[in-house]
Image (tube, rainbow, N blue to C red):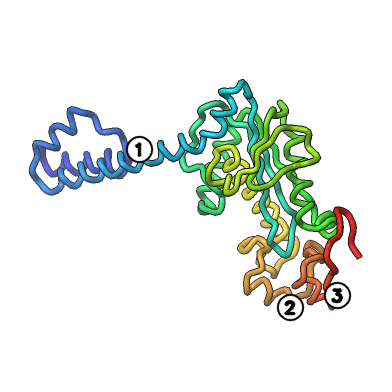
Amino acid sequence: MTRTTLAYLRQRYVIEGRALEASVEAELRADHRAGAKAILQSVAQRRTRNRAEGQRLRGMLHMENALRAKGIVHVAGVDEAGMSPLAGPVAAAAVILPAGVRIAGINDSKQLDAASREEIAAEIKTRAIAWSVAFAEVEEIDRINIYWAGILAMRRAVEGLVPMPQHLLLDARQLKDVALPQDAIIGGDAKCACIAAASILAKTARDAVMRELDRRYPGYGFAEHKGYPVRFHHSMLSKLGASPVHRRSFAPVRAVLGLPPLPPWTKPGHTT
């Protein structure tokens, strides 16, 4: 092989990541130059990563496959995003994936960068049997508290699915007012493909809302920190005061507004 050939092979099989044909691999193994060995090493590392990813994705289908083995076809993963921010709605998503579908890179949305989340979200929407995104608005958060607002958003997401699911898988939650069999899985957004899919759709949908709110209420940095209580957000909240989309049931916002702390919540829909 010439140097030109090695450069071409590196471009094709290392940079572009194409599958290495057996005949080409045999030629590279017979070539004792460092460049040939480097190509083989890169291909071997990619194969190891691919096998590990395949095993991870198979593991993330375990719960759904177990339910399908019992004749349950439509299994929906449900998750929320935006419980901790000081501003903006809470989002939730519900996703029914086809049996055995593998979406490369799917994971808990918090483990992915923004570009990966957007790319995977688009694939989820294309390949899902059904998906739904819903919100609970700031006014609802302040009226019923953030916990119940998250439950409300998840219920709305489930109700938006067509077809309706036969079973729900949730990340450490239960929807007691939804008359469907369900399992709450601790850390489910990193263990179960359909919950991870819901996590990604909820996160990307809420991020899009916060980018729009950043245009409507400039200065707070909503597009960057999405309303989370980072130092910059606290600083601008103190400087600018609370916007209409800040959660007035949250202590830092109440403090800026000069409002007293809220007493403990007693039941859904009740504040004093």
Residue at image position (84%, 57%) is: 139
Q: Which mark is residue 51?
A: 1
Q: Which mark is residue 64?
A: none
Image height of 128 relative to 257, above or below: above
Separation of marks 3 and 1 at Cα, in angstroms? 56 Å
Which residue does the image show at 60% across and 48% down from the upper left?
A: 186
**Location of residue 70 (image quadrant):** top right
Image quadrant for the C terminus? bottom right
Give the mark nearer the N terminus: 3 vs 2: 2
Query: In terms of image quadrants, where is residue 131?
Result: top right
Could you tell me which secondary element the residue under label 2 belongs to? helix
CA separation, marks 1 and 2? 50 Å
Q: Is residue 155 visible?
A: yes
Left/right placement of residue 126 relative to residue 51 reads right
Label 2 amino acid?
Answer: Ser
Q: Amino acid at mark 1?
A: Arg
Earlier in the chain: of badge 3 and badge 1, it is 1
For residue 11, say whether it is visible.
Answer: no
Foreground disc of the pair 1, 2:
1
Distance between mark 3 and mark 2 Cα atoms? 14 Å
Establish if 186 lies above or below 265: above
* Amino acid at the residue labelled 3: Leu
Pick the front one: 250 or 242: 250
- Can you identify the residue that label 2 sits on? 238
Residue drawn where x is 76% and y is 55% of the image:
147
1 or 2: tag closer to the N-terminus:
1
Identify the residue at image location x=78%, y=33%.
179
**How many residues crowd mark 2 within 10 Å: few (<14), some (14–19), many (20+)?**
some
**Quadrant of the drawing holding the N terminus:** top left
Mark 3 is surrounded, within 10 Å at the Cα level, by few (under 14), some (14 to 19) or many (20 or more) other residues, namely few
> What residue is shown with label 3?
259
